[in-house]
Amino acid sequence: MSYTLQYGQIWPYLPFLLDGALLSLQIAFLAFCGGLFIGTLGAAGKTFGGPIVKRLINVYVVFLTNTPQLVQIYFLYFALPDVGILLSSYVAVLIGMTLNAGAYLTEIQRAGFESVRQTEMEAAETLGFSRAQQIRYVIMPHVARVLFPPLSNHYILMTLGTSMAAIFGVEELTGRAFNVNAETFRSIEVFSVTALMYIVITVAATAILAVIGRVLLRARMRII
Amino acid sequence: MPRLDIVDLKAAYGSLTVLDGITVSVGSGKVLGLIGPSGSGKSTILRVLVGLLKPAAGRVLLDDVEVRYSNAGDVKRVRDQLAIVFQQYNLFQNMNVLDNVTIAPVKIRGRSRGEVEQDARELLAKVGLADKLKSYPDELSGGQQQRVAIARALALKPEILLLDEITAALDPELVSEVLDTIRVLASEGMTMLIVSHEMGFIREVSSKVAFMADGKVVEMGAPAQIFDAPSEERTRDFVSKILRH
Ligand SMILES: Nc1ncnc2c1ncn2[C@@H]1O[C@H](COP(=O)(O)OP(=O)(O)OP(=O)(O)O)[C@@H](O)[C@H]1O
Ligand SMILES: [Mg+2]
């Protein structure tokens, strides 16, 4: 068996693939932000809410962290039309990933909220801090520092997870790679270049996040 | 002048009565040493004084004015005048040494940063940490952290300082550096309430010592009396046991 690598053939498709990579980044970013919003509410509800609120949030978290994300998106894309809700593939993927992230980020952030040291709060209280000042000066900086590394990790995972959008025909990086492959039949070249693009994206994101975390929050993070 | 009177104070955690009628007082510039077995309620007295636990009964008088702990204004006033240092230092982990010391005077009291920083540098120099201003708590030894906590308490210029087992979490070789700091404060006339198991130290710095057991003050008197000639059986037991160690 001999196979001659011909990267030249897919060279013209590079801008097309890069464009797809931008869409991947966009999906990951939007879903992460949405998930962060849900996760903050969820974690606050689980930490400070009443029993019914806690129960409801639990149901949400258990359902979404114990079913495959693919099934969740299939549900949005194929099952919802049966009850009259039609979503485009892009929207279905975005909503699916947002809801999924919301569940995971609820759990991650709750752990951060709970790691606030009661003793530090008491010290703040006896120094005369009001409740709002305790949140502002003690809780928030602590939570940000503790949560930044796991949130960064989840963001990286989500970036890679966007590739499942290809299944629904969304033309993000993987979807476009699939199309280029169908046109050129240079599978090794197409998918190795695609893999390399994912690596560059995640390694760059990891490094940037680690620098931000270390400089701004004194978080313990390795820069690659 | 700061003077603190505690009259028949009672406090409970749920149904567990922890303070069962405590009456003690500290005069201006005096040091009251609180000793007693574990669980006797020493820490609880300090927690009630700074408003972390509401008293169930009894009175606390600060300069002859009663403190109503159910009244937010009174609690604020008492926190302006009393400062507490905890056994576990409880420094703000996300702030460096200088910020730990300056945050309350600047953000809570609204004093000018320049002036507060000047004071903080002096205080930190006094506790031997002039070269650690930019360090974070997790970069310091236990003894250093405890001295930062003392400086943080002093930065609010309290009239009375409450110290709860401030050397208990320290390695023996670090204890003396913290105790030296307190000795200086005592000699400068700081009014203090000190809970400690360091009997030699308590004896040396206290004007008066109260021995507690089961939420009550069993015996109170001059250090020489409590340590050399206790009149109560329980005091004698405790003192002889602890001094033998
Ligand atoms: N947060 C709490 N909830 C319930 N009970 C508590 C709490 N804190 C203390 N207690 C109980 O109150 C009693 C007095 O505790 P306190 O901490 O005042 O004792 P102490 O004299 O300071 O003891 P030690 O020398 O061990 O520090 C103990 O029986 C303790 O178990
Ligand atoms: Mg105690």
Image: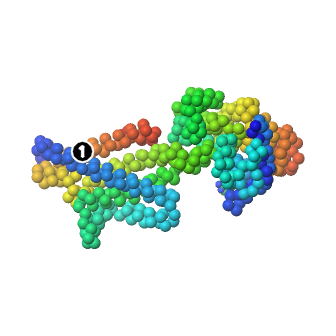
Residue at 35 percent of width and 43 percent of height: A206
Q: Quadrant of the N terminus of chain B?
A: top right
Residue A203 appears left or right of B188? left
Q: Position of residue B70 (x, y in %)?
A: 67, 54
**Residue at image mark 1:** A197
> For the image shown, how many numbered marks are present on the structure?
1
Camera-side residue of A200 and A107: A107
Residue at 24 percent of width and 44 percent of height: A196
Where disc 1 sits, the SS reads helix
Applied colour scheme: rainbow
Residue at 48 percent of width and 53 percent of height: A111
Q: Is residue A53 visible?
A: yes
Quick one: label 1, few (<14), some, or many (20+) residues within 10 Å?
some
Q: Is residue B98 visible?
A: no
Residue B94 appears left or right of A126? left
Pick out the residue farthest to the bottom: A83
Q: Is B131 above or below relative to A43?
A: above
Residue at 12 percent of width and 47 percent of height: A2
Q: Position of residue A58 (x, y in %)?
A: 45, 64
Instruction: Report the amino acid beneath label 1.
Output: Met
Q: Position of residue A136 (x, y in %)?
A: 51, 46
Camera-side residue of A198 and B117: B117
Q: Quadrant of the C terminus of chain B?
A: top right
Q: Residue B180: name its quadrant.
A: top right
Chain name for mark 1: A
Residue A202 appears left or right of B152? left
